[in-house]
């Protein structure tokens, strides 16, 4: 039999962002944690609870189901049902026992007496590439052929009922006879032949759900709240003993797995109300922190004693496992890494807490991909628009991991109690910098389109998202090594963690990464535009914003802030070009010293001459002859002498009475040629960065008058 009902229906398993409104407050209260979030396990338990309630997985067996595991099959004819008739004489299969139905959501009606909806199908996924699912219902591989689907259908009788946990349930449950009957059917070659041929004939290559439906012509076992007394056929979710066996099978995996024979005992759950109860030690961890296979992390671990350290009770363990959809939804990609932002209420959540509804709605929207902001920024954004929720009432856990294997993750950065305050302050500072004369006002540094860190039109809300991402520093800093093997020493990761903690970042370390980024982006062979001016502009805006937000730790008295209140009226004339330079230097507190002024002016002269050379279509430019990585205390005097000589020669060729770019020449001479650079206190990276800043300034100086007027 094959149903054509629903063949034109296409469903997507979307989250209901207002689902908590329909949950009984007493059940919500009973399921919520009794204590504030204090660990990553608390986050998992909270998220898992919100997920199961939002999916409608209520009641005794709801939390054990995995409705999203087969979410891609919703609306398709992908549910293979083997039918069984239960009579006083035992169990039997009809002559034509296999049918295919549309796997539907809760809105689906009965088809030929079968309700093929999610809760009645009652699929509980076993998170492993091999093995039978916890439930009688089983999902196949994505590319299984009809022969393999025939095997899956038959294994509902030959394999699942004989699993240890299911057999144990058959022994001590009043309706264990139903489980025994399934196993006995599996021993019937005739019955299994019918099931095999039926499944093989009706399936094709691809993924299917395989389950069993029962018709009770005699004794009826105990049923669940999903039981429909008017239906002819009943799926596993309607029958209590099948659900009990599923729960036992899933629970067994909490203490018997890998090298653990029986990792359980009487203790206090790591997540719970402090009551002594049975706790389990080898609970699956969606975030790969606590895995019994990771012996390199716990070299003397006795798996059977794992329950003594961070054991979880059954409710917390199942909730942690159910958190996967919400946890995964909080992931953001970074350079070779994954960043996780897990918002949570700063206190004990209750069913009357508006913030809990906001958090659930945020997580549901992320599962449905209805938001592009990272979760920390989203909490701030939604809280700002919510009349009853203060975004500062939330904290969030930040994790940065390198997934070097499927179940092996390396933790590179972690902050369990971050707030959005530092991100708001940094975003505001960054916005002020972009609106200053250095950028948006007079365009003293370039702000090309397409660079989000240079977009002066972004508001604080939008920038909170930008500055709390790993990308805030990944755009401006070079990686210390290979992105294929990232480490916690990476300044991009450490700086992100520091921002989220509200702690300062070492300026010298940041300048080192800035310079390396400029060097790797500099292409002397690119005759059109070899210098990465946009990267330098982003670095300058970021450095100044960090300093203004109090997040920069500079050795000595150096202040990297920009004066965002200065205004100056300039045009393209010779005199005002000097005023423009003076305004730029005055706006940057870091350029107050003679040494930095000199190295900056040298870079500006290099950039300005290079612009002149390109306008004259000269084959080589000064910026390619004196790249950033060639600047040292030992070489800077020679570079300055060569650049000054070039400017004098070009001035003579143009018939200029004095020298072109005299305002830059004066700064170079005053800063570089009046003392010995070998005695400077500046680090090499400091010199190279401010030299590069000068180049960007000079290349961006579009004034053309001066050397041709006289």
Image: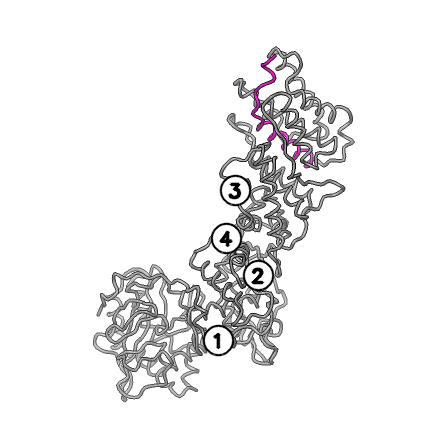
Q: Mark 4 and 1 residues: CB-CB less than 8 Å, in contact?
A: no
Pointer 4: what residue? 373
| Nearer-N-terminus badge (4/3) | 4
**Residue 642 visible in rendering:** no
Q: In the displayed structure, would residue 247 be above or below residue 6?
A: below
Which residue range is magenta in the image?
A: 685-710
Q: Is residue 701 magenta?
A: yes
- Label 4, label 2: how many angstroms apart (C-alpha)? 18 Å
- Label 1, label 2: how many angstroms apart (C-alpha)? 23 Å
- Magenta stretch, main secondary structure, is helix
Q: Residue at x 28, y 64 (%)?
A: 77
Pointer 1: what residue? 25
Secondary structure of the residue carrying numbered label 3? loop
Q: Nearer the viewer, mark 4 or mark 1?
A: 1
Q: Mark 1 and 2 residues: CB-CB less than 8 Å, in contact?
A: no
Q: Nearer the viewer, mark 4 or mark 3?
A: 3
Pointer 3: what residue? 457
Q: Nearer the viewer, mark 4 or mark 2?
A: 2
Q: In the displayed structure, would residue 411 be above or below residue 34?
A: above
Secondary structure of the residue carrying numbered label 4? loop
- In the picture, the quarter occupied by the N terminus is bottom left
Pointer 2: what residue? 390
Q: Mark 1 and 3 residues: CB-CB less than 8 Å, in contact?
A: no
Please give left or right for residue 640 compared with residue 388 in the image.
right
Local packing at callout 4 (Cα closer than 10 Å; few below 14, some 14-19, many 20+) is: some
């Amino acid at each position: 039999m094959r149903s054509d009902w629903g063949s034109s229906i296409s469903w997507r398993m979307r989250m209901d962002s207002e689902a908590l409104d329909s949950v009984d407050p007493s059940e919500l209260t009973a399921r919520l944690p009794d204590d504030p979030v204090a660990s990553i396990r608390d986050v998992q338990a909270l998220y898992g609870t919100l997920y199961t309630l939002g999916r409608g997985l209520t009641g005794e067996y709801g939390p054990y189901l995995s409705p999203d595991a087969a979410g891609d099959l919703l609306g398709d004819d992908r549910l293979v049902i083997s039918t069984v008739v239960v009579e006083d004489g035992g169990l039997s299969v009809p002559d034509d026992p296999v049918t295919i139905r549309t796997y539907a959501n809760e809105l689906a009606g009965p088809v030929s007496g079968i309700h093929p909806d999610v809760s009645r199908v009652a699929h509980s996924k076993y998170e492993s590439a091999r093995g039978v699912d916890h439930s009688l219902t089983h999902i196949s591989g994505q590319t299984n052929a009809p022969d393999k689907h025939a095997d899956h259908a038959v294994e509902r009788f030959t394999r699942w009922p004989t699993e240890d946990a299911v057999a144990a349930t058959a022994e001590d449950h009043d309706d264990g006879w139903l489980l025994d009957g399934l196993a006995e059917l599996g021993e019937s070659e005739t019955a299994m032949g019918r099931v095999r041929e039926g499944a093989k004939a009706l399936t094709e290559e691809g993924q299917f759900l395989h389950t069993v439906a029962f018709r009770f012509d005699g004794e009826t076992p105990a049923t669940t709240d999903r039981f429909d007394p008017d239906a002819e056929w009943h799926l596993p979710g309607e029958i209590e003993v099948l659900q009990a066996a599923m729960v036992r099978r899933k629970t067994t995996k909490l203490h018997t797995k890998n090298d653990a024979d029986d990792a359980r005992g009487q203790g206090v759950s790591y997540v719970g109300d402090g009551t002594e109860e049975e706790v389990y030690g080898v609970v699956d961890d969606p975030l790969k922190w606590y895995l019994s296979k990771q012996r390199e992390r716990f070299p003397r671990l006795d798996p059977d004693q794992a329950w003594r350290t961070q054991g979880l009770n059954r409710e917390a363990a199942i909730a942690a496992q159910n958190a996967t959809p919400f946890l995964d939804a909080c992931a953001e990609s970074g350079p070779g890494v994954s960043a996780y932002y897990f918002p949570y209420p700063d206190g004990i959540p209750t069913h009357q807490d508006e913030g809990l509804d906001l958090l659930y709605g945020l997580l549901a929207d992320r599962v449905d991909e209805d938001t592009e902001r990272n979760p920390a920024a989203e909490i701030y954004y939604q809280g700002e628009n919510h009349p009853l929720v203060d975004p500062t009432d939330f904290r969030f856990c930040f994790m940065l991991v390198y997934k070097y294997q499927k179940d092996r993750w390396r933790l590179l950065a972690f902050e369990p109690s971050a707030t959005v305050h530092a991100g708001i302050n940094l975003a505001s500072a960054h916005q002020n910098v972009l609106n200053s004369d250095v950028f948006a006002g007079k365009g003293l540094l370039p702000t090309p389109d397409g660079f989000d860190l240079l977009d002066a039109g972004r508001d604080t809300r939008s920038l909170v998202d930008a500055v709390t991402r790993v990308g805030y520093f990944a755009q401006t800093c070079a990686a210390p090594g290979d992105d294929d093997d990232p480490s916690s020493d990476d300044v991009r990761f450490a700086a992100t963690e520091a921002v989220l903690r509200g702690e300062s970042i070492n300026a010298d370390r940041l300048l080192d990464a800035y310079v390396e980024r400029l060097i790797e982006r500099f292409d002397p062979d690119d005759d059109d535009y070899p210098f990465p001016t946009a990267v330098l502009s982003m670095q300058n805006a970021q450095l100044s914003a960090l300093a203004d937000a109090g997040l920069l730790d500079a050795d000595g008295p150096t202040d990297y802030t920009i004066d965002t209140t200065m205004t100056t009226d300039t045009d393209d004339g010779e005199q005002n070009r000097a005023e423009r330079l003076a305004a730029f230097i005055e706006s940057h507190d870091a350029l107050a010293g003679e040494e930095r002024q000199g190295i900056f002016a040298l870079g500006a002269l290099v950039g300005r001459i290079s612009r002149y050379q390109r306008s004259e279509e000269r084959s080589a430019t000064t910026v390619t002859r004196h790249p950033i990585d060639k600047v040292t205390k030992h070489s800077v005097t020679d570079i300055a002498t060569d650049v000054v000589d070039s400017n004098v020669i070009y001035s003579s060729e143009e018939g200029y009475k004095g020298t072109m770019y005299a305002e830059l020449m004066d700064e170079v001479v005053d800063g570089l040629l009046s003392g010995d650079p070998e005695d400077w206190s500046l680090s090499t990276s400091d010199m190279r960065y401010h030299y590069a800043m000068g180049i960007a300034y000079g290349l961006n100086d579009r004034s053309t008058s001066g050397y041709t007027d006289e």
